[in-house]
Amino acid sequence: MMEEFKSSTLGRVTVYSIQACPHCMQAKATLGRLGVPVCDVDLGRHPELRARVKELTGRISVPQIFFNNIHVGGNDDLQKMVPEELQRLVNLVKEEPLPADAPPLPEESEAEDMAGETDGEFMCEKDELADLVEDLKLGNEIGTHRRGLTLYKKSFSCDQLVDWLEREKGLARAEACSTGQALLQKKYMVSVHGSGQQDGCFGEGKDALYRLLQDDPHSALNAGQTAACSPIAAAELSLLVRELILKMFSEHLSADGKSVDYKAMSVNPSFERYCELAIQLQRVELLTLSREEKLAFFINIYNALVIHGNLRLGAPTNMWQRYRVGCTNPIADLFFNYVSYLIGGEVFTLQDIENGVLRGNRKGVAQLLRPFSKTDPRLQVALPDAEPLIHFALNCGAKGCPPIKTYTPQDIDGQLRTAAEAFLENDDACLVDSGKGEVRLSQIFKWYKADFGGTDEKLLTWVVEHMGDSPKKTSLQGVLSAGKTKVSFLPYDWSTNGSH
């Protein structure tokens, strides 16, 4: 949100930031204590200014801070500034008029148009079959059935459903059968035994049993209720989900940007709206998505699911609590293998989304097998190859992860390249020691080296190609041209950002 100023001739501090960015929050908190007018420009809402900011600063990461027309850098630069220099800049803003070459602000009309985009209540058109499903729940058709030695709770047969549709809804038998098929295709129900489990055909096989999707037993955080809205386009739904949870995240991010009050966030009235949106993921159509739509959809959903998982289960505080079997903390145990959403009729954990879908069904950290077997229906959704750029867009909830953003299918590759460039600007992502001929990289590059070429040489080539023009890039090119570059990896911060 941008502050209003009484006079355009006053000096100002301009901060270019994004929503829910801890470093941006910390910088603005520091500036707020200085008693200077601060204008906060959200580059997420005003991407048209990104190119100009990069031209002025040579950086793509946020925040970027200007005192009048003087660029001081990012949050780390601000925090390290010597008191005398900082006071000089404060006096400059308070005493000198705003120069003509001050950094740009958005047009007022644009700022007004963008305000309140996600403030309205979620509304949807009710699906034509939703009421029928609610009536079916109240009938006597759903019960326990035995097939061999197995009991199937909350199930019903094809004949039971068809007979009920004829008797209670007055449908002819052919129409009742077609309605059963529609319920299966629209993912209101799933096959649990017999014909239809693999091919989606309803009514074949006298032993076939079905179950309403909401009754299918699993631990997905958006399960247990029926998605009653007409299916919403995946790209649109993921944007709604992501923007709403980012708004809540921002509201409960501490003023210094160091922690998130997940407990207060869980009782925020907006969280109930968020859960209603997440339920609609149950029946979203995935098989028709393009590569660009898949990337944007699953990155947004992954980042939202991490926050939802922290809200419901508590945040894991280290790598082993995220991945290891048999952790002493039962809440954090297998966080990435357990936290899941029901999406398009299938359960996707965080591991499934990252390694199954976005990395082209590759084994992840501490995984012995690929996420999806050859017969797994989710394999149809997986990208054909690993996309290395996703590692700079996925936010795992730890302090060492890249900034949170919302992605769109339009120019998704450009957005991901921007995320990678911003990540590589940070010293906790890449450090170059020209004297020792050493390059120190984030652990992300070690864990997923296969995605970046598999060797140190190919990895460093990838890093250079995805860096913005900067002194760091020049230093790295110099080290590489000298030969015999040593590659090591920096410690990774797995501590939680939760205040509870």
Image (cartoon, grey):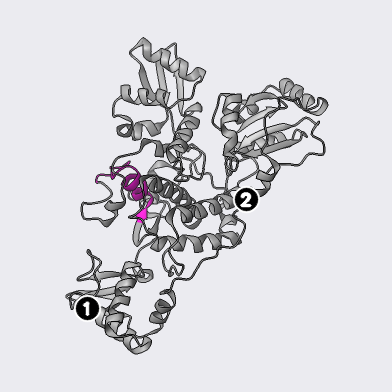
What is the three-letter code of the residue carrying label 1? Arg
Residue 76 rendering spot, x and y as whole percentages:
60, 28
What is the three-letter code of the residue carrying label 2? Glu
Marks 2,1: beta carbons within 8 A: no
**Magenta range:** 348-369
Give the residue at mark 2. 251
Q: Is residue 396 above or below residue 189?
A: above
Determine the CA span between mark 2 and mark 1: 50 Å
- Label 2 sits on a secondary structure element that is helix
Residue 148 belongs to magenta span: no
Give the number of the disc on residue 146.
1
Residue at 69% x, 45% y is: 109
Residue 460 rendering spot, x and y as whole percentages:
36, 23
Q: Quadrant of residue 192?
A: bottom left
Image quadrant in which the N terminus is located: top right
Q: Is residue 139 above or below residue 497?
A: below
